[in-house]
Image: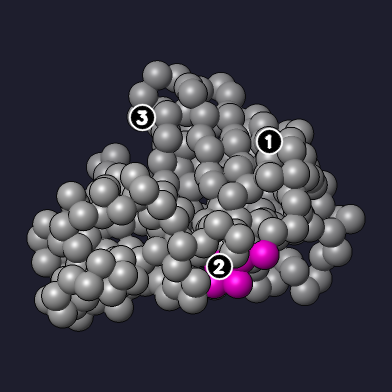
Amino acid sequence: MRARARTTALAALAAAAGLALAVTTAVAPASAAKPVRGGTTTTSVASGCGDLNGLKVTAKTVSRTIALNAGDVIGVTVSPARSGDLILLGGSAGTAIFFEEASATTGMKFTAPYSTTYGLGWSLETSGTVPSDLTWTFTCSGSGGSGGSATTSDADRDGVADSADSCPSTTLPDSVSRPTAGKYFANSSGKFVDGTGASAGVTVVDAGGCSATQIAKALRLSKKDSRSGISLTTLKSWAATH
């Protein structure tokens, strides 16, 4: 039942975030972003990282549309929270979809992989009834320091500044035609996974802005590696040196 509830909650958050991106940007100016108290959901548009930093919202769930630079970090805590409770995050940026979870007692951090506008939604998963008066506290920091984001050029939006990008013109997700277990490639969120969906624990940012296809080409690996992905050993070795 809890797994089903989680799936339902994530789907609802993704829908809410998508709605925020499509609707509130058109009807609400950035100056209209205000916390809502006592509601079940609050949705508004924030113009940037600084608008979210220090924000407190009292509601059951929260959705925000926000423009972030690659590398900006959103932190969120919720209270009251009990051991075993989870913060769920669902959202989108263009065609990329995000689903993440973290312990509600320690809080969640989301790092923006691209410089773009995001639709994000947060909710609490608990074994009991979710209170309607949850208090959500947000922080947001970027390369410009807490509460602000420095403008960084990232032409291919892979999360790595052009000045430090080992592989310009990265395209996500990786263009693999034969996903295989044990062979890793970058998905649309910039995370390396194999053909079964297992995570490598490595991101495109960790790999210097390179996808599996680009790594295979740079190392002159076989066409098979380009079609199915690269080994975990190759991936981690590349990430350690880029």
What residue did someone put label 3 on? 127
**For the residues marked 2 and 3, what is the alpha-carbon distance in whole angstroms?**
38 Å
Q: Nearer the viewer, residue 133 or 153?
A: 153
Of tags 1 and 3, which is closer to the observer?
Answer: 1
On the rendered structure, is 100 left or right of 151?
left
Disc with the residue nearer the chain's start (2 vs 1): 1
Q: Can you give x and y, in whole percent of width and height, for residue 201 in the image?
A: 30, 45
What residue is shown with label 2? 157
Q: Amino acid at mark 3?
A: Ser
Residue extent of the magenta highlight? 153-157
* Residue that label 1 marks: 139
Question: For the residue carrying disc 3, how many other residues have a C-alpha within 10 Å: few (<14), some (14-19), or many (20+)?
Answer: few
Precedes in sequence: disc 2 or disc 3? 3
Main SS of residues in magenta: loop
Amino acid under disc 2:
Arg
Q: Pick whichever of labels 1 and 3 is earlier in the sequence.
A: 3
Q: Quadrant of the N terminus?
A: top left
Question: Dots 1 and 3: beta carbons under 8 Å?
Answer: no
- Secondary structure beneath dot 1 equals strand
Return the x and y of residue 222 as percentages of the image width and height.
14, 75
The answer to whether 165 appears left or right of 139 in the picture is left
Figure colour scheme: one colour
Do tag 2 and tag 1 residues touch (Cβ < 8 Å)?
A: no
Residue 42 highlighted magenta (yes or no) = no
